[in-house]
Image (tube, grey):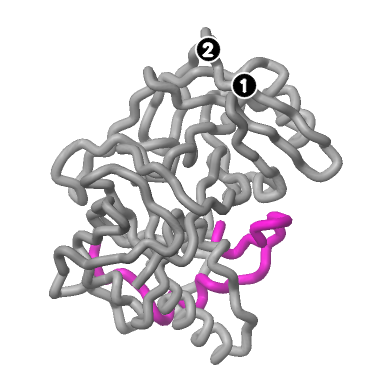
Amino acid sequence: MRVASLHTYPIKGVRAVDVARAHVEPRGLEGDRRWLVVDANGRFITQRSHPRLATITAAPTRTGLRLSAPGAGEFLVERPSAPQRADVIVWQHQINAALADVQAGAWLSNYFGEALRLAYMDAVAERLQRNAWVADAVPVSFADAYPVLIVTTASLAAVNGEIERAGGAQVSMRRFRPNIVIDCGDAWAEDFWRVVRIGGVEFELVKPCDRCVVTTKDQETGASMGKEPLASLARLRRSADARINGVLFGWNAVPRALGRVAVGDAVEVLERRPEGFALRSDLPHGFEVEHFLP
């Protein structure tokens, strides 16, 4: 098995940036989800509520980001050096983050038609994940919950096979917004991995990723594309663990040894999860994909 592709999302919710290599930090891949768009109350926004985020490109520069979007031109934003700070909210976490200059907020506000600000997770900002899935507190970026998301090509092929069986069109891996895509020949093999080594970096797979409406959005336009892949995942991958009420694709992972990963790196399973992960075989009467909508 080898790494097929690597992806970062400089601002949570925007288009993926494909990279050939990346340094792995405790919070995840370098530059991944270190920026966040927040509303007037400091609460994060994502494609769940603001699908036009998918139309924004955030290209990393030496000192910050180059933002661009259809009809909005380009805007250069610098990493804040002596910043104003504010508490921002990502799910249940409140993080004291640095605020980008007001011009960056104005560019976003004009594009979305509402008051928005851009926040940055600098060295002072701290967000720790503590829950039943991790033994110790885990530092996290502005990602939903964990530092890294790992997926496999064979599992995508299995989902697309089910979609086609039901008369639908295949979906791209981009819909699942992964960090590390592994070229693997066995669908759902990742359910049986506990620790993997990629290049010289070790990752512990701690929790399968429950999926939401973002997977139904076109990752270039933000347009809703129907109920797939959620409808097919509901037939294939419904969690039987009471702690996850949803459908599953990919695994959330925590770096246990840091370093650099690159496309083409070998992937080695160091520890296995012999029991796999429990899945439901029954689909409840009246179940609808809307169950997973916000």
Dividing the picture into quarters, in which one does residue 136 lie?
Answer: top left
Residue in view at x 81 percent, y 45 percent: 70
Residue 46 vs residue 9, the one in the foreground:
9
Residue 198, placed above or below residue 23: below
**Residue highlighted by disc 2:** 81
Residue 271 vs residue 168, the one in the foreground:
271
**Hey, what amino acid is under mark 1?**
Glu
- Which element carries disc 2, helix, strand or loop? loop
Q: Would you say the residues marked 1 and 2 are in contact, meaning their CB atoms lie under 8 Å apart?
A: yes
> Which range is magenta?
214-242
Residue 45 vs residue 177, the one in the foreground:
177
Q: Position of residue 218 (x, y in %)?
A: 66, 61
Q: Label 1: how many residues lie within 10 Å, few (<14), some (14-19) or many (20+)?
A: some
Q: Residue furthest right?
A: 71
**Residue highlighted by disc 1:** 78
Residue 150 vs residue 127, the one in the foreground:
150
